């Protein structure tokens, strides 16, 4: 621990690392992962259509449930967001001063996206759980014994979505750590 | 903008603000708000019991739905977390060096709590919406026309929970801004 309360900087022989630790490559990798998982989550959810004959044809589609529509919308937004932030990160990769400012903005927006993705994953997850187990108290019957393929798609999509949410959490951690490493000790 | 690429600090007449902007009071205020909203969300959700005679007694309780149980668990955790972080913030309020480290840890954990609260709000929100509107495609009937008091409690609890999630988002923004203000320009 350095001595506290001294507003003057040390101009001693050991230079303070002003540039800080550089996590740009890891950050970019995670943003690519976010894009990939958003894309997979949306595609798997949208392609889950299944029609059963009971005996009349009764299709199951993601857009019949507002929860799944919100899920698809949220992960479409995060997919676009990941592209924009990849471009922003690439454009600032060599500019130290600009980058500190960018990191702050990235934390702001990453936190918003984390909230959106986590709520979307929770929303879709609760509907999927209800479809899988039903609820005796309210008389809501399970439907996954009938719509097996649809439920597999929904389950896989939510799992990928959960992974994407964790990636955003890691992105916030990395950006915060990166800014923190630029503060003189 | 200062000139970039210079690793040496200026020891000129204008001292760089190493202590950074101080948002401690605002941070503490928000953490109190988080505690209050967590407490209110849990209490309102738990006290929503309602029994209807149709003609047999059929109670509605939050613990009949896994979504609402998760909601109560999540906001109980955030209530405890807010107490712990209020104590941590108070203990470090005068120590600049310790505080920068603490801010980083707070961002880490605030982001985790944001993910938990957002997912819990989404989970409970989708169940409340289903209870309010039902879903014709799956044959899940709405229940809020019968359990009016229960649904009012659930709705109010989710609204307070959403407010709590936004408070955590603000907390992340403040901590990030506070760390950023300590980086020399």
Image (tube, coloured by chain):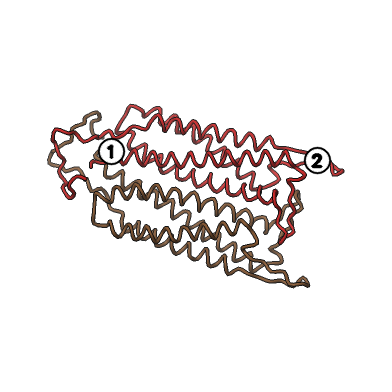
Chain colours: A brown, B red
Dot 1 falls on a residue whose secondary structure is loop
Q: How crowded is mark 1: few (under 14 residues within 10 Å), some or many (20 or more)?
A: many
| Residue B119 x %, y % | 55, 48
Q: Residues within 10 Å of mark 2 (few under 14, many from 20)?
A: few
Q: Which residue is drawn at 48% across and 38% down?
A: B167
Residue A67 or A29: which is nearer the viewer? A67
Circle nearer the N terminus (1, 2): 2
Q: Do the numbered discs 1 and 2 sit on residues whose CB atoms are within 8 Å?
A: no
Residue B130 or B101: which is nearer the viewer? B130
Quarter containing the N terminus of chain B: top left
State the residue position of label 1: B182
Horizontal side, residue A142 vs residue B86: left or right = right
Check residue B52 in the rendering and tell me which mark sits there, or answer none.
Answer: 2
The chain identifier of the residue carrying mark 2 reads: B
| Residue A110 x %, y % | 42, 51
Dot 2 falls on a residue whose secondary structure is strand
Horizontal side, residue B89 vs residue B40: left or right = left
Residue B51 or B148: which is nearer the viewer? B148
Quarter containing the C terminus of chain B: top left
Horizontal side, residue B159 vs residue A26: left or right = right
| Residue A8 x %, y % | 18, 32
Mark 1 to mark 2: distance in Å?
59 Å
Q: Residue at x 32, y 50 (%)?
A: A102
């Amino acid at each position: 621990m350095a001595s506290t309360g001294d507003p003057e900087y040390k101009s001693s022989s050991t230079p303070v690392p002003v540039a800080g630790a550089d996590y740009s490559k890891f950050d970019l990798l995670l943003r690519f992962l976010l894009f990939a998982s958003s894309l997979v989550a949306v595609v798997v959810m949208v392609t889950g259509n299944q029609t059963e004959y009971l005996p009349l044809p009764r299709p199951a589609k993601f857009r019949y449930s507002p929860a799944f529509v919100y899920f698809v919308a949220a992960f479409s937004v995060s997919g676009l967001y990941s592209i924009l932030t990849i471009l922003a990160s690439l454009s600032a990769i060599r500019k130290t001063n600009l980058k500190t400012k960018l990191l702050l903005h990235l934390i702001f927006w990453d936190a918003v996206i984390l909230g959106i993705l986590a709520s979307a994953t929770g929303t879709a997850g609760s509907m999927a759980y209800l479809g899988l187990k039903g609820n005796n108290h309210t008389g809501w019957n399970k439907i996954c014994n009938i719509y097996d393929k649809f439920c597999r798609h929904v389950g896989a999509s939510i799992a990928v979505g959960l992974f994407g949410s964790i990636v955003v959490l890691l992105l916030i951690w990395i950006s915060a750590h990166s800014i923190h490493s630029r503060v003189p000790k």
